[in-house]
């Protein structure tokens, strides 16, 4: 039946009404719907049954068959008063079938404190037109509860403290109008809870302390309008949880302290609008929570104190909008922000995370990983393919940067080199120049190993040449001075090379035709003195000429001269680089 109308009119006539199942009612209710201009939209016939007759059926413990009926002012509270039953005592009803029915009331449509004893409740395609709707503290029995395609035009719908059966609950394609919808402390049994494509419209929706148990829960393609959506303290079980493509509206969305337990939760392609979003202190014992291609709108996003130590939380290609995002002091097994756009401050100071994936992200602001008042325990960090337009606040030692990059098992040396280069650029922006140097060294090391190991060359000769080239570069550029980042190490390398060459001059004197002779009448020096003196003036390219080499010493001397010139230049570059920066 049409849900979007302005007013309606009911006309009761003395005409027998037959339902599709063959049930007979002595009177017919003709319901006409009007638009804002008082034009008729549609007119439809229903069977008419008086509420007194319904109460008599309850007295006889008969199942209520209200299919295709118009019911006016039905109230279990009125029934209690007429039967002198205490207002908190449950009224037992065998079962209720009210498919395609039309409920109307001047006050409340009241099903509170009833207990279904045998059958279930079927309100599929039912229309609740006027008056508040109250299912407070209702026990829906062991059979399936069906509100699919139902229309709720009530300003207040109350399902708080209800207990649904273990065969499932169905609100698929139901339509709520403006007003509050209260499911606080409801227990959905162990069947599936289906809210697929449900339109909650404007008004607050509350699932506070709701227990969804182990059944599957689906809010797929559901729509929430203006008003707060609250799942605070809700508990899910082992079933699949789907909020895929759900539109949460533009007000506050509250998933604080929600227990997802073992269920796999799917928020893929959901739209959280412009309101504040909080998953603070929510938890999951294991499983997976995904936010793939989710649009988080413009509100602040809070994932602080989350307890997902054994759970993977995936935000691939999510859009985080224009507000800060915080994962402060949370625990994850695997936290992935792969291919996300991080346009604002991102607090990733997690308490514990086995794997943190920031690959292929575009970061335009600060990504904060630097410990503050607790250790940021990240086992593996992946920055492959990141486009860093902002900066990363991270500490080389406190965050164990070198280890968390090298621990990656699914990246090659080329990808690791790219990550260290990204960190080098970030350290430069934040003024951490010593950490920039450390990142640069690891970048060059990984780049060199990548060229060594990842080149497809089947020729043994070329492989040998490649390895020789690698080890020469490793010795001269890496070990001698950490790629010109450590002038003190270059200076130590200079001293070491000088001593080695001095000793070599002594060795070749005993094993070959080699000597260092004096060209002057100055007092003669011993062999050791001549070797160290000649080595010094050769290494430093001074060349006084008072001593000159003969034999194999002539071969060794120019080699040392070249080594000295190279290392002095290397030292100059490293020293100037430090001073200028």
Image (spheres, rainbow, N blue to C red):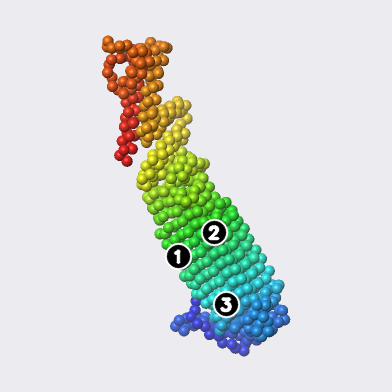
The residue tagged 2 is: 282
Seen at 68% across and 69% down, the residue is 142
Q: Give the quadrant of the N terminus.
A: bottom right
Distance of label 3 from label 2 (alpha carbons): 31 Å
**Label 3 secondary element:** strand
Expressed as whole percent of the image width and height from the top left, the position of residue 42 reads 52, 80
**Label 1 secondary element:** loop
Tell me if residue 264 can be seen.
no
The residue tagged 1 is: 275
The residue tagged 3 is: 133
Position of 166 relative to 105 (above/below): above
Q: Do the residues labelled 1 and 3 touch (CB within 8 Å)?
A: no
**Label 2 secondary element:** loop
Residue at the outermost bottom position: 14
Seen at 62% across and 67% down, the residue is 187
Label 2 crowd bin: few (<14), some (14–19), many (20+), radius 10 Å: many
Q: Report the front residue among 184 and 387.
A: 184
Sequence-first disc among 3 and 2: 3
Position of 366 relative to 484 (above/below): below
Q: Do the residues labelled 1 and 2 touch (CB within 8 Å)?
A: no
Instruction: Look at discs 3 and 2 and give the one toward the viewer.
Output: 2
Expressed as whole percent of the image width and height from the top left, the position of residue 555 reads 35, 17
Q: Report the front residue among 269 and 362.
A: 362
Q: Report the front residue among 354 and 415.
A: 354
Label 1 crowd bin: few (<14), some (14–19), many (20+), radius 10 Å: many
Distance of label 1 from label 2 (alpha carbons): 19 Å
Sequence-first disc among 1 and 2: 1
């Amino acid at each position: 039946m049409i849900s979007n109308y302005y007013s309606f009119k009911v006309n009761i006539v003395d005409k027998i009404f037959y339902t599709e199942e063959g049930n007979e009612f002595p009177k017919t209710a003709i319901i006409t719907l009007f638009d804002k201009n008082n034009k008729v939209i549609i007119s439809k016939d229903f069977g008419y049954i008086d509420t007194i007759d319904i109460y008599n059926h309850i007295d006889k413990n008969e199942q209520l068959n209200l299919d295709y009926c118009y019911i006016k002012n039905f109230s279990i509270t009125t029934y209690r008063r007429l039967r002198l039953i205490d207002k908190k005592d449950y009224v037992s009803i065998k079962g209720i079938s009210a498919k395609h029915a039309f409920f109307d009331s001047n006050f409340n449509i009241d099903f509170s404190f009833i207990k279904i004893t045998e059958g279930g409740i079927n309100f599929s395609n039912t229309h609740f037109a006027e008056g508040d709707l109250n299912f407070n503290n209702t026990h829906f029995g062991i059979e399936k509860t069906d509100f699919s395609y139902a229309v709720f035009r009530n300003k207040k719908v109350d399902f708080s403290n209800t207990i649904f059966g273990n065969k499932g609950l169905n609100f698929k394609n139901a339509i709520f109008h403006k007003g509050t919808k209260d499911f606080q402390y409801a227990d959905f049994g162990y069947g599936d809870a289906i809210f697929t494509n449900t339109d909650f419209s404007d008004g607050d929706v509350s699932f506070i302390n709701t227990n969804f148990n182990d059944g599957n829960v689906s809010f797929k393609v559901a729509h929430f309008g203006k008003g707060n959506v609250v799942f605070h303290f809700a508990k899910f079980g082992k079933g699949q949880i789907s909020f895929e493509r759900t539109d949460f509206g533009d007000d506050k969305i509250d998933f604080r302290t929600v227990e997802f337990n073992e269920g796999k939760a799917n928020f893929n392609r959901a739209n959280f609008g412009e309101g504040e979003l909080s998953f603070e202190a929510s938890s999951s014992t294991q499983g997976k929570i995904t936010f793939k291609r989710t649009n988080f709108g413009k509100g602040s996003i809070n994932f602080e104190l989350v307890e997902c130590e054994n759970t993977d939380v995936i935000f691939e290609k999510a859009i985080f909008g224009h507000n800060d995002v915080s994962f402060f002091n949370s625990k994850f097994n695997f936290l992935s922000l792969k291919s996300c756009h991080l346009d604002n401050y991102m607090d990733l100071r997690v308490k514990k995370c086995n794997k943190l994936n920031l690959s292929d992200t575009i970061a335009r602001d600060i990504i904060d990983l630097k410990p503050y008042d607790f250790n940021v325990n990240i086992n593996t960090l992946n920055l492959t393919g990141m486009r860093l337009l902002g900066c990363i606040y991270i500490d080389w030692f406190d965050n164990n940067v070198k280890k968390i990059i090298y621990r990656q098992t699914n990246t090659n040396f080329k990808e690791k080199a790219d990550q260290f280069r990204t960190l080098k650029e970030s350290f430069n922006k934040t003024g951490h120049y010593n950490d920039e140097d450390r990142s640069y060294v690891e970048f060059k090391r990984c780049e060199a190993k990548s060229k060594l190991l990842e080149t497809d060359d089947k020729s043994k000769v070329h492989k040998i040449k490649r390895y020789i080239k690698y080890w020469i570069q490793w010795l001269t550029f890496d070990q001698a001075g950490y790629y010109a980042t450590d002038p003190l190490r270059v200076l130590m390398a200079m001293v070491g090379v000088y001593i080695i060459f001095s000793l070599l001059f002594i060795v070749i004197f005993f094993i070959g035709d080699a000597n260092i002779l004096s060209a002057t009448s100055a007092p003669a020096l011993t062999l050791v003195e001549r070797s160290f003196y000649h080595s010094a003036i050769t290494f430093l390219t001074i060349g006084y000429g008072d001593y000159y080499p003969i034999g194999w010493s002539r071969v060794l001397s120019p080699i040392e001269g070249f080594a000295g010139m190279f290392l002095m230049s290397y030292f100059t570059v490293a020293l100037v680089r430090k001073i200028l920066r």
